[in-house]
Image (cartoon, rainbow, N blue to C red):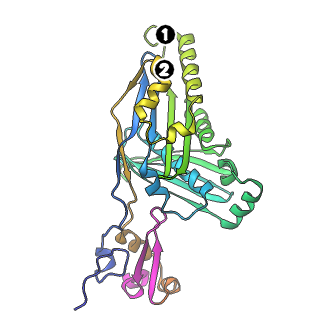
Amino acid sequence: MVPPVTDPTLPSATPAFLNHDRPPVPDLVVPRGVVPFHLDQRPVRGRLVKLGPLADALIGRHSQHPAVLRLMGEALALTAALATALKYKGSFSLQAKGDGPVSMLLADCTDGGALRGYAKADPEKLEALLVTHPQPTAAQLLGEGYFAFTCDQGDDMERYQGIVAIEGDTLAQMTDTYFRTSEQLQTEVRLACGRSLAGWRASALVIERVATQGGIGELDEAEQDDAWRTAQALVGTLKAEELLDDELAAERLLHRLFHAEGLATDRPRALSYGCRCSRARLAAVLENFGPEDLDHMAESGAITMTCEFCAVEFRFERDEVDGKAGRA
């Protein structure tokens, strides 16, 4: 008797459409991944994201150049910061698509804090860029294209998407441009991603100017303007090393920046490893191909599919996938 196959990535005796197994990916949660805050009696609110070991779990699975992985880490932290400012059920995503070495950058976060992302890079274009720019900017990696945020709450709700052209050298500048031009919202964004002996780390600090009419408490409009500029200047003093320091708790870092500005922190939000792939999902993708396409994909009698988010390879026996013809 042949023992049952327990690894969901390998061919299974269970029909593909019935096999819902998840791959062996990390079951990792960062309980205080996002700390929301506001400045009392000032038109400022924000979120500080410190992914901690979650960044390494998400980024370290991908065999890309460090420049690409840093961009991916910044996108993950930024997406977490923006998603947790919204009230929604579903997923919030950042997507950048351009004609540069990184043709696609995608990160998304569910309303429960499940985070995932990937970057698609052209090795030849990237190699050519690195010859002249060993430390390329986000703009140089992405090239010309578009930058979009999407909130998808399922088939029963209208999908919201905002799209602008890529403008700015860094991902933070692109985000500021997006909110200024598309949402008429003033923001200040700081992003950091790097690799240490502990692995990859990524962090984001986002502040927004709260829209008001008249004054806030005892502050008139001119004083509100001053309060916002002060908050921007304080964010400008933040160093990447502080954002990425595991020993520097989010609340302590925020206290360093805003203790004299009426800092009030809100309930932290958890973030988790959020790839949602499964054998059944990828099998459904294969079922949309015709027999000739499936035969072309097969090597040694099996088809291998790699999840772009978690980089896990799934193997399907060619004869277990029927394709379009098999359903006719």
Residue 64 spot, x, y in % from top left:
58, 62
Residue 260 spot, x, y in % from top left:
47, 17
Q: Is residue 100 above or below residue 74?
A: below
| Quarter that holds the N terminus | bottom left
- Outermost residue on the bottom side: it is 1
User: Within 10 angstroms of label 2, few (less than 14), some, or many (20 or more) residues?
Assistant: many
Mark nearer the N terminus (1 vs 2): 2
Q: Amino acid at mark 2?
A: Pro
User: Within 10 angstroms of label 1, few (less than 14), some, or many (20 or more) residues?
Assistant: some
Q: Amino acid at mark 1?
A: Leu
Q: Residue at x 59, y 58 (%)?
A: 104
The residue pinned by badge 2 equals 43
Q: Quadrant of residue 15?
A: bottom left
- Give yes or no for residue 305 being in the magenta stretch: yes
Q: Is residue 158 left or right of residue 141?
A: left
Q: How many marks?
A: 2
Q: Which residues are the magenta region?
A: 301-328
Q: Is residue 144 above or below residue 300?
A: above
Q: Quadrant of residue 326?
A: bottom left
Q: Quadrant of residue 176?
A: top right
Mark 1 and mark 2 in contact? Answer it, CB < 8 Å. Answer: yes
Helix, strand or loop at mark 1: loop
The residue pinned by badge 1 equals 219
